[in-house]
Amino acid sequence: MIKIAPSILSANFSKLAEEIIDVENGGADYIHIDVMDGHFVPNITIGPLIVEAVRPITSLPLDVHLMIENPDQYIPAFAKAGADYISVHVEACPHLHRTIQLIKSFGVKAGVVLNPATSLQSILHIIDDIDLVLLMTVNPGFGGQAFIKSVLPKIQEISGLVKERNLSIEIEVDGGVNEETAKLCISAGANVLVAGSAVYNQTDRKKAISLIRGCSK
Ligand SMILES: O=C(CO)[C@@H](O)[C@H](O)COP(=O)(O)O
Ligand SMILES: [Fe+2]
């Protein structure tokens, strides 16, 4: 079962509630929220206040992707704001195991994110502790970038590991996912596809979501 997580980064923020309801009605499985701090990545976006405002708008799980330095400082605020998943970049976590325990202490599902250049080796020690692995298929910071195909073997590698060890970890991909690149990600073993521009740049979001999921309409 392939899940689609539209990223609101590409939504029209002047009517955010409508934009979220539109993708929920269109069959989205999660709402992906990109949090950027202007330090870990060269862009600034959303804070806990927006997560809190979005929470009552939808019954879908809120999938919060933290692209920030020192995530431990802000995890409590995002958890209290209503995040269902909080994912942190391994590149921003010198004490990754502690950070994952902090996320889970709030009853929130814990994810780890790897930049395209980061190898799976960096998360092997915490593989039994996490709910989700997010593999970036662009360099984080902006929507609308081109998919980096060289990440595909890493998706296959984590997928093989998850099967071999019979783990219940979701494998999410993020960046440049569209109707075509989605097929490559699904074949490699991903089961959650984040899509920002490929959903929100279309007027018919239901059709866009179906096409990314691999349905014919
Ligand atoms: O985390 C990020 C970017 O850093 C993403 O979630 C983007 O928002 C995805 O946008 P598209 O590449 O699908 O347009
Ligand atoms: Fe993201």
Image (cartoon, rainbow, N blue to C red):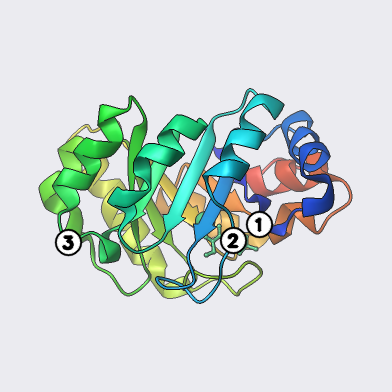
Pointer 2 or 3: first along the chain = 2
Secondary structure of the residue carrying numbered label 1: helix
Q: Circle 2 sits in a helix, a strand or a loop, which is it?
A: loop
Q: Residue at x 32, y 38 (%)?
A: 110
Quick check: marks 1 and 3 in contact, CB under 8 Å? no
Q: Is mark 1 within 8 Å of ligand 1?
A: yes
Question: Looking at the image, which is closer to me, 37 or 211?
Answer: 37
Could you tell me the amino acid type at mark 1? Leu
Earlier along the polypeptide chain: callout 1 or callout 2?
A: 1
Q: Are marks 1 and 2 in contact (CB under 8 Å)?
A: yes
The answer to whether residue 24 is above or below residue 153 is above
Which residue is under mark 2?
Answer: 45
- Direction from residue 118 to residue 31 in the image, left or right: right
Which class describes the residues within 10 Å of circle 2: few (<14), some (14-19), or many (20+)? some
Q: Quadrant of residue 68?
A: bottom left
Position in image of residue 10 (x %, y %): 71, 58
Q: Residue furthest left?
A: 125
Name the amino acid, label 3. Answer: Pro
Q: Residue at x 41, y 74 (%)?
A: 150
Mark 1 nearby-residue class (10 Å; few <14, some 14–19, many ≥20): many
Quarter-wise, where is residue 167 in the image? top left
Q: Amino acid at mark 2?
A: Thr
Q: Alpha carbon of mark 1 to alpha carbon of mark 3: how far?
A: 27 Å
* Image height of 140 relative to 209, above or below: below
Which numbered tag is attached to residue 94? 3
